[in-house]
Amino acid sequence: MEIVIDPDAGFCFGVTRAIRMAEDAAKKGPVASLGDIVHNPEEVQRLKNKGIGSVTHTELPKMQDETVLLRAHGEPPSTYETARLCGLNLIDATCPIVSGVQKKIKKAYKESLAAQGQIVIYGKPGHPETIGLRGQTENTAIIISEPTDLDAVNYNQPLWLFAQTTMQPAKFSMIADEIRNRFIQAGQNPDKMLRVYNTLCHYVSGREEKIREFARRFDVVIFVSGANSSNGKFLYSCCKEENPKTYFVTHANELKKEWFSKVSSVGISGATSTPRWLLEEVK
C-alpha cells in the first residue's frame, strides 16, 4: 500500500516560529502561553511536558513578574497594557504577517476618524486574531463573517475593509463585491468610498487548492487535526468534497481497519495547526 504524507501539511510559518520561541524561553525557566499556543491538544501536551503551560486572559491580571508568551494570533493593545502593569516578561510571538495587518488597521483607523469613516474586518467573531485586529480600532471595527452581516455597515460613510489572515479568499472577494454593490445602491461611488486591503495569508489561502489536488490522488485520505481548529474543519471539508473517502482523526488510535479494505493508496494531511510529528505517527 502506498502511504504519502502531504508535503504542504504541518505548521504554518507563524506557528512554527511561536513554538520555537516558546521552547527557547523554556530552557531558561517556566513559560506560560496566553491561550493554547496552537489548536492541537497533542502538541499542547508535548509543550506542557517541556515546561510550557498556558493561562487565560482572565488569569493574566493576577500574575506578577512571570514570563508570558503571546502566541502567533496576536493580541489587542489592552493585553500589552495589562502585562506592563503586572510587570510581566512578555515574549511576543505574534506572527509577522499578523503584526503587519495590525499596523495597517491601526493606521487606517486614524484615517477613518478624520474622514468619519468605518473599519470593517472579515473575520470570525471571538477568534483570537480578530480580537487583536479589532483592538487596533479601540474595539469599534465592525466584524463581518457572512454577507448577511453587512446590514451593520453605513453605506453613506467611507469604509476600509480588511480580513483576518486565515479566512477564505473566495468569500472575501464576495463580501468586497457585495459592499461595492451596496454603495452603488445607496447612491455612492464605491471607488471613492471603499478601500479594500487583501490581508489574507498567502500560505493559508494557497492551502485550499493544494489540498484539493492532494485529496484527488488517493483512494483514501486521512485528515489529522484538533477538533477545535477552524482551519482544520475547513480544509477537511475541502478534502471531503474532492474525495468522499476522507476520514477525520485527532490521533492515530482513531484509525479504523475497515477504512483501508481493498485500498492501494492513502494520503495523510492536516490543518496548519497539526504538527508534522503527529502526521508521521498516523502513518
Image: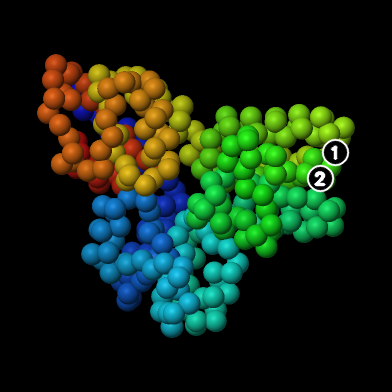
User: Residue 226 appears at what percent x and percent y?
Assistant: 32, 46
Which secondary structure, mark 2?
Answer: loop
> What amino acid does circle 2 point to?
Pro
Q: Does 142 sit left or right of 96 as displayed?
A: right
Dot 2 and dot 1 residues touching (CB under 8 Å): yes
Instruction: Report the front residue among 102 and 146.
Output: 146
Above or below, 107 relative to 146:
below
User: Residue 173 appears at what percent x and percent y?
Assistant: 64, 31
Above or below, 148 relative to 66:
above
**Disc number for residue 158:** 2
Above or below, 240 relative to 166:
above
Give the colour scheme shown: rainbow
Q: Does 194 sit left or right of 99 as displayed?
A: right
> What amino acid does circle 1 point to?
Lys
Quarter of the image with the C terminus in it: top left
Disc 2 residue crowd, few under 14, some 14–19, many 20+, Cα 10 Å? some
Quarter of the image with the N terminus in it: top left
Please report the residue visible at 83 percent of the width from the left and 53 percent of the height from the top.
Answer: 116
Q: Does 141 sit left or right of 47 as displayed?
A: right
**Disc number for residue 192:** 1
Please report the residue visible at 70 percent of the width from the left and 31 percent of the height from the top.
Answer: 178
Can residue 95 be seen here? The reply is: no
Q: Quadrant of residue 77?
A: bottom right
Which secondary structure, mark 1?
Answer: helix
User: Residue 138 appears at what percent x and percent y?
Assistant: 67, 63
User: Residue 246 appears at what percent x and percent y?
Assistant: 29, 26
